[in-house]
Image (cartoon, grey):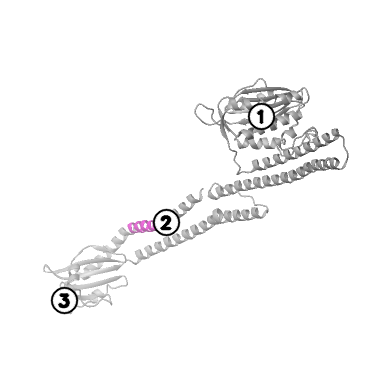
Amino acid sequence: MKIKTWLLLSYLIVMILPLAAAYALFAWINSYHADRNVTEYVEQWNNLQKMKDVLDNPLLYERGADFKPVESLKNEQVVITLYERSGVLLFTTDPYAVGSISSFNREKLYQDFYTIKQQYRTNIYKAPVFKEGNVIGIYEITTMRSDWVAGVENRTWFVVSLFLLLFVSIFVIVIWFVNRKLNNPLNLLRKNMQAFGTGQQLTPFTKRQDEIGDLAESFAAMQDEIEKARQHLASEQQQKEMMIASISHDLKTPLTSISAYAEALKGQTLTKTQQVEYTEVIVGKATYMKQLLEDLLTYTLLQSANYEVERVSVDGQEFFDMLTSDYAPLCLSKNIELTTVCRVTGSYLVNPKQFMRLVDNLMTNALTHVSSNGQILLAALDAGTKPAECYSFVASALPKKNGMYVIVQNSGSGISEEDLARVFEPLYQGDTARTKVHSQGTGLGLSITKQIIEKHGGNVEMLSQQDIGTAVICYLPSIKGENQHEMVN
């Protein structure tokens, strides 16, 4: 039950309880009155008949009358009062009644004859006394309703006691529920928050279907997000430390070579051929260092969450046809068969410079790991097509229906599953055949590729099959617009 519902229900019970107690008391007294009314009326009437025989005597209403017969009727439960017809008090068994009644009271005195008028504590009966057809006096008999009052009071105390008992019980139950549903869970949640903040072990929180349960689930979700962020930061920190160490090593090696060859050029007599050779080595090492620093700068820039790639709208066919047309001479010089395919429609938002770098990185990676006389496929295709030029395991891994794919596929021995899961990590070298000693790569190319395509709203994956080859697949969504493909992420 929701806490809001429970509180409203408790408030309703507390509000209704006094009304219910009052109604129960009223109904019980009415029931008791109904049960006692007939019996009390009969008893009262029988007693009145005995008294009337004495009080109807006209002699009692004359001045100087003897009231001993009336005094004989006196007891603690009955008060008898005799009046002259003018309203003057003649006699009363009530020691506290004195004087005479006023004219207003005299008018009241002549009302309600021959009826038993019930009040809370008394029954009052009045009747006139006649002599020769004229009223000479009035008597009033007041009977105490002691038994009835005692019964009502007993029932009132019982209902009040029951009400107090219920009130105290409800109060205790409310306190118990407040502790169970509010105080204890909130204290546990507070302790868990403090424990989480200080890195201590958390106490398990029982699943609840109320607002505190929702709050606990939100805290658990926040905790998971923070833990993921911590792990991500720790992973990034580890990668940065590894990157710094690796780049330091990669810079130190060419710097050592440059220093050695420069000393050789400076301090020794060399032939023309040796001078040219040493100069080429120095230039090559300097170019490699420049490329390494440029890749590091690009990777750091792309990793920033605040960095946005500036994109422009391009015609897909024209742009990607240009992008795939510049690698034939390079592949021919390496005796590698290159196949290019460009079947793209619609418009796309791209950063031309960054996308050229993406394709360069993929082609460099493919050229590095394809053997002589091997094959490379560079394709730009509309999503939703099944290209015959691709390997079967590549064609079956193109699920998107809108947008386009850039595919770089090369023949070779393939990559293991373990390496496939980590190839986009910076500086990861899972295969000794891929180290920088044998290739001139910096180890950041695939990581930069992943950052570029994600900044464009797409994604990248690498597929491989042993003894067949490897493919890198980049997906790019198209622009939302009239007569164009709808972007699908």
Q: Does 245 appear above or below 356?
A: below
Q: Which residue is mark 2?
A: 15
Q: Residue furthest bottom?
A: 64
Q: Position of residue 176 (x, y in %)?
A: 54, 57
Part of the protein shown in magenta: 18-34
**As rendered, which of 122 and 68 lies closer to the eye?**
122
Q: Is residue 75 magenta?
A: no
Main SS of residues in magenta: helix
Q: Nearer the viewer, mark 2 or mark 3?
A: 2
Precedes in sequence: disc 2 or disc 3: 2
Q: Position of residue 484 (x, y in %)?
A: 52, 27
Q: Is residue 241 left or right of residue 149?
A: right
**As rendered, which of 161 and 429 lies closer to the eye?**
429
Precedes in sequence: disc 3 or disc 1: 3
Q: Amino acid at mark 3?
A: Glu
Q: Which residue is mark 1?
A: 473
Check disc 3: other Cα within 10 Å, few if <14, some if 14-19, many if 20+: few
Residue at the image position 42 percent from the left and 63 percent from the top: 157
Check disc 1: other Cα within 10 Å, few if <14, some if 14-19, many if 20+: many
Q: For residue 62, which numbered disc appears in the image?
A: 3
Location of the C terminus (image quadrant) = top right
Q: Amino acid at mark 1?
A: Ile
Q: CA distance from mark 1 to mark 2?
A: 69 Å
Q: Position of residue 145 (x, y in %)?
A: 32, 66
Whether residues under marks 1 and 2 lie with C-beta atoms below 8 angstroms apart, the answer is no
Q: Amino acid at mark 2?
A: Met
Query: Disc 3 on helix, strand or loop?
Result: loop
Residue at the image position 53 percent from the left and 49 percent from the top: 211
